[in-house]
Amino acid sequence: MRRIRILLFSTVIIALSLGYFLQPGKKIDEKKYLGEIAPDINFSEKKGSPAHYLSDSGVVAFNTYDVTPSITGYAGPIKLLLSISDKGVITGIKILEHKETKNYVHYMERPEYLGRFLGKSIKDKFEIDRDVDGISRATVSVEALAKTIRESSRITASNVYGMDVSSEGAGRFEVKWISYLLIFSFSLVFYFLTRRSKRLLRARDWGLAAGILITGIYLSSPFSILHVFNLILLRPSSSILWLVIICTTFISLIVAGRLYCGWLCPFGAISEFIGRLPVRKWSVPVETDDRWRNLKYILLAVIIAIVLLSRRPDYGNYETYVTLFSFHGNYLTWLLVAITLIANLKIERFWCRYLCPVAAFTGILSRKAKGYPSRHDCPMGNKPMPMISECIRCNRCYKGRG
Ligand code: SF4
């Protein structure tokens, strides 16, 4: 494990440094798109604060990143070219650049979706599923998009037109991050309780089922290695849900190792439930199994190199749960989902054992823990000499109970 840690850590450092020199952020030619969002209108040169283009008819166009750079989606800011009239109405919109995961935002990029913002008053609240249509599997990105439009257009209208725009925004109560926090708290509490009493082990199944329904289907936000890449590339999201997912995963890593994998991950939960079906399992020789388990670390090193050199987290996306819970993918990615789910009938938690980049990431950060001797029904087949990096803390074998 020490060698694997050194390999991954050096890959991060080398690829990050090389990527910095190879991909020095390209400049966007905004003028090229002005005619697209406001045809037949002549704009001045870019000027003022915040920087904007002004037309004789009073329409103002601007790059939202010049106004609200701190509003971010899952993977940094969503840069838009926006035009508004002197009445405070949105008249044109174009996405200039974003680094969100394509699976989730493919619908958000379409002109028919963006067109729904046209004609809206900048005084509107831009509340998802109220006055702005939500996209069920792209919550964080769509919220960032709506907030970017609302805040940047209000600031620009106030500065350019002297318009008095109310600062009323979308409501702050968010069911989504609270529901994730509840599932996490449930898992953490029962993780500790099941270390005291074996009788409570059944509660883990309830947590896994809730993970599938809430984290997977409702939130469509399982923890992804792309979260880690966005952190490394200094592109943290301004979404509370994103922050909650990141913080809880890191906290759990410190206090309970791979708790996320064993209690919260919706794909791991589906894999485990499939693996429990009464189908005779393959018996993989221990040496072969150990060798195959290293595959996930090699894959992680490869995608670290690809992502950090290109500075594009979406290039490293082979995570089956992204396809499954975004309900979007191509033939190849859906085939991978099908194979990795069916394989659980023969090898339990097949994806988690051999391929998952999150498993590799949480594995290298798992600290030593006493009292886990493993046993014949370990869901990770972590035997006969259990490795703590492979233990998902299901607590079935925990021996420290009084
Ligand atoms: S080693 Fe024990 S606690 Fe860890 S996954 Fe296997 S059975 Fe569960």
Image (tube, helix red, strand yellow):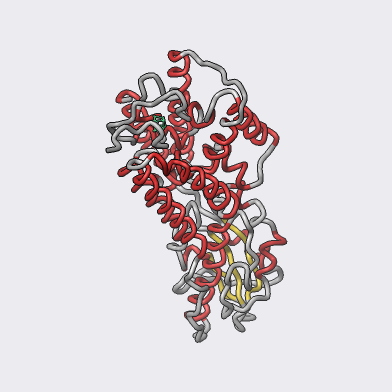
Whether residue 162 is situated above or below residue 52 in the rendered picture:
below
Residue 289 seen from this side: yes
Is residue 97 left or right of 297 when viewed as pictured? right
Q: Which quadrant, please, contains the N terminus?
A: top left
Is residue 99 visible from the viewing direction of this image?
no
Q: Nearer the viewer, residue 293 or 153?
A: 293
Question: Measured from the top left, where is residue 172 in percent x and y?
Answer: 47, 71
Percent across and percent down for residue 161 are 53, 83
| x 44%, y 60%: residue | 240
Relative to 388, does residue 81 appear above or below in the rendering? Answer: below
Q: Is residue 368 above or below residue 159?
A: above
Dividing the image into four quarters, tell me where ligand 1 lies: top left
Q: Quadrant of residue 198?
A: top left
Query: Which residue occupies the foreground of this view, 215 or 202?
Result: 202
Q: Quadrant of residue 91?
A: bottom right
- Relative to 280, does residue 391 appear above or below in the rendering? below
Could you tell me which residue is drawn at 35 percent across and 39 percent down?
A: 257
Q: Percent from the top left, x then y, of residue 248?
A: 39, 51
Rendered location of residue 103, percent (x, y): 61, 46
Looking at the image, how many numbered discs can be counted on the residues? 0
Viewer-closest of 9 and 310: 9
- At 42% across and 32% down in the image, what residue appears? 360
Q: Does 197 sit left or right of 99 as displayed?
A: left
Name the residue: 71% across, 70% down.
40
Q: Nearer the viewer, residue 37 or 275?
A: 275
Screen quadrant of the C terminus: top left
